[in-house]
Amino acid sequence: MAALTEAQLRICVHACITRYDRGEGDIATIIGSYALDTEQRKKVIKNIISNRSDLLLDNIEDSPSMEVSSAQRETIKWYSSIFRK
């Protein structure tokens, strides 16, 4: 995936927080459902922590939930297309 703009990063962060608040899973699983590279994932995590310091993100990067399955990648391609110009 290409580099995210600041607006796209904020959208992703707020989407993760909203999904967490709705009970769709733990934050690691939610972040893992997006097609983000390592650098993008770090930026999302950093922004989530700055927005919601109450979320515990201990060892989130080591979580197996952060891995995206090949079946999820097809769904993710569709979501990723909203960020294309």
Image (cartoon, rainbow, N blue to C red):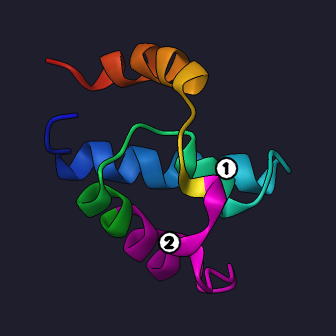
Where is residue 66? Give x, y as percent: 56, 55
Query: In this figure, which residue is indicated by the disc labeled 1?
Result: 18
User: What residue is drawn where x is 63% and y is 49%?
Assistant: 30
Where is residue 77? Give x, y as percent: 40, 18
7 within the magenta span: no
Query: In this figure, which residue is indicated by the disc labeled 2?
Result: 61
First of labels 1, 2 by sequence position: 1
Location of residue 10 with respect to 49 vertically, above or below:
above
Q: Residue furthest right?
A: 23
User: What residue is drawn where x is 34% and y is 19%?
Assistant: 82
Quarter of the rendering containing residue 85? top left
Residue type, mark 2 in image: Glu
User: What residue is drawn where x is 63% and y is 59%?
Assistant: 64
Residue type, mark 1 in image: Thr
Neighbour class for label 1 at 10 Å: few (<14), some, many (≥20)? few
Any part of residue 6 in sight: yes
Where is residue 81? Give x, y as percent: 32, 16
Where is residue 43? Give x, y as percent: 31, 66
Left or right of 52, for residue 84 = left
Quarter of the rendering containing residue 53? bottom right
Any part of residue 17 in sight: no
Write the start and end of the magenta stretch as one range. 44-65
Query: Are dots 1 and 2 in contact, CB under 8 Å?
Result: no
